[in-house]
Image (cartoon, rainbow, N blue to C red):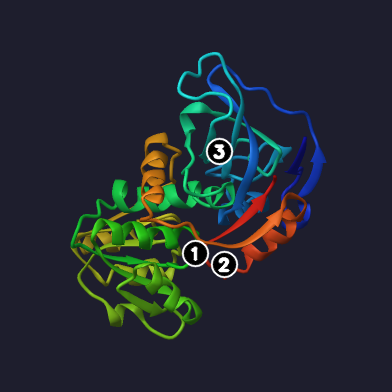
Amino acid sequence: MKAIRIHQFGGPDVLELEEIVVPQPKADEVLIKVYASSVNPVDGKIVAGEAQAKFPTKFPLTIGWDVSGVIEQAGSHVRNFSIGDEVYGRPFPTQNGAFAEYLVIKASEIALKPQSIDHILAAAVPLAGLTAWQGLFKFGKLEKDQKVLIHGASGGVGSFAVQFAKWKGAEVIGTASADNLAFIKQLGADQAIDHDNQRFEEEVKDVDLVLDLIGKETQQRSLTVIKPGGILVTTVAPEYQEEAKEKHIRLEGFTAQSYARDLEEIAELIDQGLISPVVSAVFNLEEARKAEELSKQHHTRGKIVIKVI
């Protein structure tokens, strides 16, 4: 089978298209014929060797940590899926990923894909959707009528977070570039702030929850807009614990987990027409370097998808 692998750390130029043996599933795993995967910011960090503490890498490594496809084989202990099922999920980033024609993954880490969308759109969902879902609801405890500030609201995670928060009944504020303000309003944001030309701390106050996808100065400044007892949840390092404690704010970092139940709930919302994945570009497997180069520019609206079939 064809796969995009790395044998050393570096930039997108270290991605190699290779012919490798089709993996075989263990008793609790399935073999998925991959139809599509997608690009995530973590790809670049892992490829560059910048994520070793969280995701230690063993070479060679097949990248791509989203999958939508069809089950081709199932291990002897797998009872909840059948050959031919259309599924989606997020391989763990220390394992071989889905920039490949086949993928082995634990059956507990996948769910039936949303029926109302194709594999291209479904592949855009798992990592970003799970991150937004768990950040808002598991760690952020977001409830109806609360106020949430989402940084990087036009990207992969942010575009899901805006929609999830609006579905929940929250007041949603998003930061983005000027070009994306109308876009995040279309997604459901009640207020859109230009992060290049506006100081968000001068525009909002008394926020219950901040979902921080950026970190550093943005995280520090966010502490000034959260009400006492509020929460700041971040996908990067939670760097300002002392300042948060002084303001009676809970600051927590997290990495999304591939829980099948969360994927099932997200699929239900998509099939009900309440949530829509956003795909801005589609590349073939052979164009993985181009896709990762585009991702590195940090201007992507929604997701970049890798089409395998």
Label 1–label 2 contact, CB within 8 A:
yes
Q: Earlier in the sequence, mark 3 or mark 1?
A: 3
Q: Quadrant of the N terminus?
A: top right
**Nearer to the camera, 214 or 91:** 91
Q: Which mark is residue 300?
A: 2
Question: How packed is label 3: few (under 14 Cα within 10 Å), some, or many (20 or more)?
Answer: many
Say above or below: 289 vs 179.
above
Q: Amino acid at mark 1?
A: Gly
Q: Residue furthest bottom?
A: 197
* Residue under the point 47% across and 18% down: 79
**Nearer to the camera, 113 or 131:** 113
Q: Which mark is residue 91?
A: 3
Q: Earlier in the sequence, mark 1 or mark 2?
A: 1
* Residue under the point 29% across and 58% down: 167
Q: Which mark is residue 155?
A: 1
**Nearer to the camera, 198 or 26:** 26
Q: Quadrant of residue 68?
A: top right
Question: How packed is label 1: few (under 14 Cα within 10 Å), some, or many (20 or more)?
Answer: many
Q: CA distance from mark 1 to mark 2?
A: 6 Å
Q: Quadrant of the C terminus?
A: top right
Say above or below: 136 vs 227.
above
Please state if 114 lies on the left or on the right of 25 as rendered: left
Q: Amino acid at mark 2?
A: Thr
Q: CA distance from mark 3 to mark 1?
A: 20 Å
Q: Quadrant of residue 23?
A: top right
